[in-house]
Structure formats: C-alpha cells, structure tokens
Image (cartoon, rainbow, N blue to C red):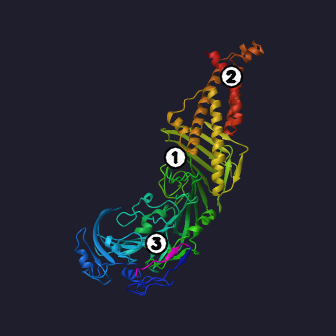
Amino acid sequence: MAFVKGCFRLGFVCLLAVAGCAGPGPGSASQVRVGDEAEGPWWMQATAMTPDGRLTLTDKPWWPRAMALEVGESFTLVSCDDDGTESASEPRMLVRRERFRNRSGEVEAIVWVIDDDEDGSIAYGGDTHADCYVVDYGPNGVVDRIVDYIDNDGNGVADEMDIRYFVDGQLSKAWFGVDLDGDGHMWHLAGYEYSGDFFKSDPYGDNMIFMNKYDPDTASWAPISECPFAFYDTNDNGYSEVAIRVSAVPLAYDPSVDPDYANDPRRYYLGGFTPDMEEMGIVNVRYSFDIDNMTGPEYPLHYDYGFNLVGAIPYPERNTSHFNPNRRPPQVTRVIAHEDLRDLADNYPAHETGFTWHEASDELQFRWEGVFWIWQRRYMENTGGPTQRWNIRREWSSQPADERKLYYSEVDRRIHLFGAEEGWIEIGHFAGLGRIGEIRMADTDGSGYFDRWEVYLGDDTVPVRVTTVRDERARSIPFEDAYLTKFYTQQVLPEAMAANEAILAAMARVHAYEVPDGLATAMASGSDTYRRYAQDVARELHYQALRRHLNSLANRAMVEANMYDLIRLDVQTRRSTVNSESAWQMARLLQELDVAYGQGDYDRACELLGRLETLVELFDTQDG
C-alpha cells in the first residue's frame, strides 16, 4: 500500500491516515522531532539527522557501492538497510552518480532518490510531487542538499517543497515553497538547488516562498531573510497583482555594519546560527501592486507601485508556527500565513516609508520581486537591489506610520504617498532617448502634500521651472485595490491624457515643436500609463521650447524698442506693432502662463495660450 501524504495549508493542518513501511508511521497529529525519526515512517527514518543537523552517507550499507559508480550508473534499494544488492522486491530508493551544473559550476555528485509515496517512481528516476533527493556534491559522504517534494493531498501534484542547504554536512538553512493555486510549480532548480532564476519558478498566481534558519541547539527552524515572499492573484487570472516581501533579521542587527542583512548569504547561508538570531524581527516590508490590472500573458509581472517600509517589530508568534506531519523533521516551520500577510503589511508600523511608482512601465525590465526602492539619495536598509533608476518616481517620508495613506494631486494629476516630504523622478533612457532631466517634489509646509515642483533639463544644475502652490489641490483617496484600479484607469489616466492633448494642441498653435520620433511613437502606442508618461515628457519639452522662444522675442523687443517712439504712436498703432508695450504684454502673459501651467490649471493655460497666439502672429508678421 502506497504511503499517502497528508493535507496541509498555511494556517491550519489536516491529517490523513498514513502508513509506514519500516516504522509506525505518524498516523496522528503528534510531532516527530529531530532525533526521534524512529517514530516516523521508513522514509523519515532513512534521512534521520543528528540533533545538531548533521547527515552523512558513509554509514549507509550501500555507500561503498555508491562510491564505485561511474557517472550515469545507478542501483536500486528496497529497504533502509539494503546494501544495494539485487532483490526481487519492488525498489523504493535509487542511488546514482551524476554530473551537472549548479550555481557554483560543474559538479559531480551521488544522488539518493527516495520514493516517499511508493508510487513506483524509482522505475523512471523519481518524480517531483512526493519524492526526496539527497545530494552529496564531491562526493565525500557528506550531504550538501536535500530537495523534498510533498504532495499533501495525494493527488499527484506537489503542494510544498523544501530545499535544504547543508554546510560541511550540517543543516544551515532551507528554502520552502507553498503552492496555493494548485499548479504544482514552486522552485526552479539547477543541480538540486535554487537556480537563481525565479522567473522560471512561480511568481505567478497565489504562491508563497520563505526561508528558515536551522538552530542546532533547539533542533528547530527560525525565520530569516525573505520570510515570506508571497504573491496574490486578486482577479483570478492566473497571475499575481500583489507581491509582499518580509525581511526577517535579528532585532539587534546593526544596519551600519550590514545594511542589507536580509539579502546577505554570509548571514543566512554560510554562517552559523548566532545568539542574536534567537530574537528575530521584521525590519522591512516591501508591498507591491499592479494598479492598472495589466498583469497577464503580455505583461506577466506588471507591478506599478509599491511601499518600502522600514521598522523593527518582533517576528510574530501567533499563527506563524506551521506543523506538517509529512515534512521531514523539523516538521514545524516559521512563517506568517498567506492569509494574514496583507493585514500585516497594511498596518506595519514603519519608522520611514519609501514610495515607488513605475511611470514608463512598458519599457521596464520586469522584476518578479515587485517594486524596489533604490540605493540612492535616501538610504533604506534591507530593501534589496540593484534596481532601475530612470522613469521611476520615488517619494520618501521620515514620519512614523502604521497605515498606508495615499492622496491625489490635481496639480500633477498623480497619486502620491501622504506625508512624503520629498520626491524625484529622473527622466530619460526610454523611447530611444538619452538623458532628459529630472523633476523634484517637496512638501515645504509639512501639510503632507507636495507643494513645490522643480524641473531640470539635461545636466543643468539650475531648474528651468519652479512651481510653488498655495493650494495643493490634493485629496485623500482610499487605499483599497478595487477603488484604486477603477480610479486610476477610469479617471486619472483619461483625464490626464485629455488635458495633455488639449494643452499640446494649444501650444502647437503658438509655437511649433518637433517631438522626437521615439517619443512620438511612445505617445501613440503601448499602455495608457506609458502613453500618458510619454505625453507628459513631450508636453514639458514643448513647453520649455515655447517659453524660450517667446521670452526671447519679448526680451529682444523690449531691449531694441525706443521708448520715445512709443509715445508718438496712437493707441491702435501701438497695439498693432511690435514695441516695448506689446513685448511687455507678452512677458506678462508668459508669467501668468507659467503659474497656470505649474499649478496644473490647463484650462486657464489654454486660454492664455490663445491670447499669446495673437501676439505671436503680430511678432511673426513684423519680423517677416
């Protein structure tokens, strides 16, 4: 009779009756601990570790025969004490010598395959739903990796997956995978370890991965590093619209010594279990969203915006110890449940907050991890990286916050982080363009809303436009998925694009501007977000060209005009010729235009452009 593994979901445990072959089998909710594997089924006994997490193969009866194997050769085993000789019984294990490549290069190894559910998979080399692979690189008789597939409901599809990493034969850490959408996809491997390419793993749909560190003193798991990284399919299309990454590190860690502890393999992989790991905390939460619902086959990882939250709270005890009777000991892992994680991210008490928005997301190199902060300007520890710099809006707040608050500004027609003191976006290197410039934002009065925008072009260190508003024209908006998607796609984008089109047309009637080919193409193709951003860039470039041209006309006329000529002209003639009065009128209109344009009042700006159009015709006629 085949051994049938139990059913396990994060947050609860469902036990099925199980039977072992060389031991009593769990058959109950009792936990089998490291050192007590004799109480478990035969496959658990086979891979029993010492309490401090050591596992060697040299004491196995079949080890001498394994060492004699050539690459490509193998033999089968019936029982745990089999020496590898031929037997009429159906084999439940396989030992083979392989040569392959992993992240370290080419490796030769002894691989011990264990058919946990006894479905006959040994006949074809093992399966990826309920078998275990014990791997000895070298080989030297010391275990380096264990890859364990767990089929919780016995349906032939893996529900969980362990990748256990040993250093010098001692268990150090493990990557765990939990498949919540039933497709059986979790980790992509190379040489029986994580390949480093999670795009080929499963950041799609409902899934969760996490890391635990092995504590040899207590023979138990502790949360560390990315614990967890979770993905949420909020619209049931098979892709993920929300991603959350929790950084678990010792609360006593020193960010000045190791600012990216959660991503440092010296700490969680090569290093041992240190005393400070006994008190683990959550020091960073990265919370990413697809606001325009474009995630799908064409844009499979289309995250638009996200929060980078820095704080320090103890790793929760409640509902984070998850027991699975079908996992090799330790059977209890530590991780926040998938269904609890969004609530934690929504209410995480951040000491400081970074807010990131992908403006030109159609041309981004998509990251399965979601939206990153950046190691630039404002240092925020444990954020990860490297990440992209251009066409990504950054906003930063030093104010403590235990909820995520957003607002909409009618000035720049964008969604912002409430309480952000500053922000910036470096523009360029998209649509075939090089560096264009930068926009910097600031909250100068502490109201929680941006009231100042500075625009820089090229490498110029002096802004070409500065806008400070008395009325921020801002309003709070709910931080709720469905509302934000509808608001952004049905109101923000259409209104911003319509306003852009109107003012671009009005400026074109006053002063012609040739939009660069790549930018013109971007304005007419791609997603609404991408087209709107291309419009924004073209609008600002056109506006700056118009201002330079009209200011040049007005300033030249005021310098060259003779004030005594003006007093000899009648009113009608003064108004119909280029002179210091008409030039001054143009300069004043440009001032008013700058205020209206900077405040995002494009209706007023278009009215002023209409009045400037008449003056420009006058200047053009006289120059001609």
Magenta segment, prevailing SS (helix, strand or loop): loop
- Badge 2 marks a residue whose secondary structure is helix
Q: Is residue 448 magenta?
A: no
Q: Name which of mark 1 and mark 2 comes first in the sequence.
A: 1
Mark 3 Cα shell of 10 Å, populated few (<14), some (14-19), many (≥20):
few
Q: CA distance from mark 3 to mark 1?
A: 39 Å
Residue 540: percent from the left, percent from the top? Answer: 60, 36
Please tell me in which quadrant of the rendered image residue 568 appears: top right
Mark 2 Cα shell of 10 Å, populated few (<14), some (14-19), many (≥20):
many
Residue located at (38% from left, 73% from top): 132
Residue range in magenta is: 1-10
Q: Which residue is mark 1?
A: 362
Residue 470: percent from the left, percent from the top? Answer: 73, 43
Q: Which residue is mark 2?
A: 615
Q: Nearer the viewer, residue 579 or 32?
A: 32
Q: Name which of mark 3 and mark 1 comes first in the sequence.
A: 3
In this orientation, does residue 226 appear? no
The amino acid sitting under disc 2 is Leu
Nearer to us of marks 3 and 1 is: 3
The outermost residue toward the right is 571
Nearer to us of marks 3 and 2 is: 3
Residue 403: percent from the left, percent from the top? Answer: 65, 61
Q: Which residue is mark 3?
A: 155
Mark 1 Cα shell of 10 Å, populated few (<14), some (14-19), many (≥20):
some
The amino acid sitting under disc 3 is Asn
The amino acid sitting under disc 1 is Asp
Is residue 575 depicted above or below 82 in this figure?
Answer: above
In the rendered view, does 418 fall on the left or right side of 518?
right
- Image quadrant in which the C terminus is located: top right
Q: Name which of mark 3 and mark 2 comes first in the sequence.
A: 3
